[in-house]
Amino acid sequence: QVQLVESGGGSVQAGGSLRLSCVASGYTYSTYCMSWFRQSPGKGREAVAAIESDGTTSYVESVKGRFTISQDNAKNLYLQMNSLKPEDTAVYYCAASNRDTTCGGGYWARGKNNYWGQGTQVTVSS
């Protein structure tokens, strides 16, 4: 059974940094796409960043240059968030593809065919 558990959320002031972690267990795909999404009150789920099993990364425009997605050999996922802005406030979710696949260009941003974590809250104050 696949389980994804996020941690590292919290409250910071604008301009600050946070590092989110996602511990994956039972995840055995060798070709995969893992990603971060976020959802703020009154808004739909928004793609943030993705990383393929070969290390290829993708970012949405609003976080380029500020956020860095990475993974380790155990398929744990990380999101380093720098220069945080109030509009980054959201619940952040870890996602992992539920089949052997790449991130498929922009397909990953649709948020389909994934396992999901429970989310971790990030609050950025001005």
Image: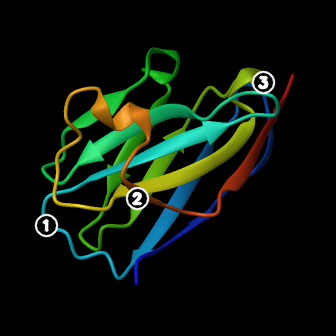
Say if 63 sits above or below 13 in the image. Answer: above
Query: How many angstroms separate mark 3 from mark 1 (CA)?
Result: 37 Å
Q: Nearer the viewer, residue 16 or 109?
A: 109
Q: Nearer the viewer, residue 114 or 65?
A: 114
The amino acid at mark 1 is Ser
In the rendered image, the quadrant that contains the N terminus is bottom left
Assign a secondary structure to mark 1.
loop
Specify the farthest residue to the top: 61
Circle on res. 20: none
Q: Which residue is mark 3?
A: 86
Say if 110 sits above or below 19 in the image. Answer: above
Say if 13 sits above or below 111 in the image. Answer: above
Assign a secondary structure to mark 2.
strand
Give the image location of residue 7, x and y in percent: 63, 64
The amino acid at mark 3 is Pro
Say if 49 sits above or below 122 in the image. Answer: above
**Residue at 40%, 32% in the rendered image:** 109
Query: How many angstroms separate mark 2 from mark 3 (CA)?
Result: 23 Å
Left/right placement of residue 70 relative to residue 92 reads left
The amino acid at mark 2 is Leu
